[in-house]
Image (cartoon, grey):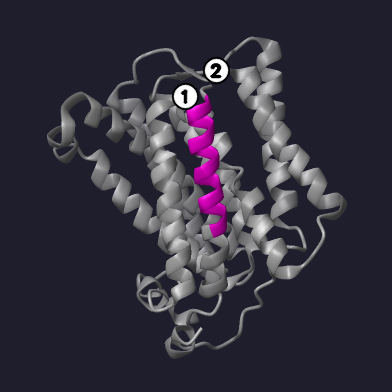
Amino acid sequence: MSLQILILAVSAACCLGFGFVLQQNAAQKAPLSDFLSPRILLDLMKVPRWLGGIGLMVVGMALGAMALGQGEISLVEPLLATNLLFALALSRRQTKRPLGRQGWTGLALLAGGVTAFIVAGQPHGGTAPSGPFRQWLIIGVMVGVALLLTAYAKRSRLSAGPALLATAAGLLYGVQDALTRVTGQRFAEGGMAEVLTSWQPYAVVALGLTGLILVQSAFETASLRMSLPALTAAQPLAGILCGVGFLGDRLRADSGALAWEAAGLAGIVVGIILLGTHSAMPCGAVQPKRTAAAVATT
């Protein structure tokens, strides 16, 4: 792994983590009638804090795209998952809570899990991307699961709904990262003309907007503790599956390496849960009735 990829991925994670906190600070005051509606974006555009969070998110996604253009998605995605460390740092500054045993354990598990997965797996590009059938199969499964989670979340919006929406968004963002890498490869091969005549860049935009609506709806109806862990855990897992499934990424497959890779992924997920549910994350209690005017004055 080159130092440049490491810097790009970690910088992207920093922008994403800070951006998520600012977005949730604003989205928790959005009208509940905006739930799962594009109107939520129109209402939140009036809130400077949310716009700042979106700006950081856009920068983070651009840096992440640059990292994906230079390294395998199976390498970059675990590094992007460290965005939760930066989200916790900003939330801790807001809530003034110490890390404590849970925070330090989560930090160690997340950092150790990322290190173990990358060192043991040694992600690299081993073969040419798979054919369209496997690509569409994996993308179809990811999008299908996201739709099912969203449909169930709509029925249980204030209980399990936020976590389900965040998981669905994470799956879509993982697919988006994979298609971003494909778009970068097409640009390198044929320039802008090749990009504009392929379907992947348009899918990247559609997935990004859909994921954004899901994330803001999750942020609107619950605290970061219920939504951000699911989002942060689902995205790298989906991205790694896409990378290995149809982008030609390869991981070491001997028994020892597989054991450490599994342990690393488990450490990442458990660390994300511990950090995401830490008391330093703002509770963001939801008010029963909110209006768009109230959001605009935030």
Q: Amino acid at mark 2?
A: Leu
Instruction: Pick the residue in front: 89 or 178.
Output: 89
Q: In x, y percent, where is residue 74?
A: 51, 28
Vertical side of 277 occupied by 158: above or below: below
Residue of label 2: 251
Numbered-mark total: 2
Residue 210, magenta (yes or no) = no
Judge from the rendering whether residue 228 lies leftward or rightward of residue 190; answer left or right: right
Asked if the residues shown at circle 1 and circle 2 are in contact, with their CB atoms under 8 angstroms apart, the answer is yes
Image point (51%, 32%), residue name: 76
Vertical side of 65 occupied by 115: above or below: above
Image point (69%, 25%), residue name: 116
Image point (58%, 35%), residue name: 78
- Badge 1 crowding class, 10 Å Cα cut-off, few under 14, some 14 to 19, many 20 or more, is many
Which secondary structure, mark 2? loop
Which residues are drawn in magenta? 3-18
Q: Amino acid at mark 1?
A: Val
Q: In x, y percent, where is residue 221?
A: 57, 72
Judge from the rendering whether residue 263 lies leftward or rightward of residue 253; answer left or right: right
* Residue 41 seen from this side: yes
Q: In x, y percent, where is residue 79?
A: 57, 36
* Residue 237 seen from this side: no
Q: Main secondary structure of the magenta part?
A: helix
Where residue 236 sits, quadrant-wise, is top right
Which secondary structure, mark 1? helix
Residue 12, magenta (yes or no) = yes
Residue that sits furthest to the top in the current view: 254
- Mark 2 or mark 1, which is nearer the start of the sequence? 1
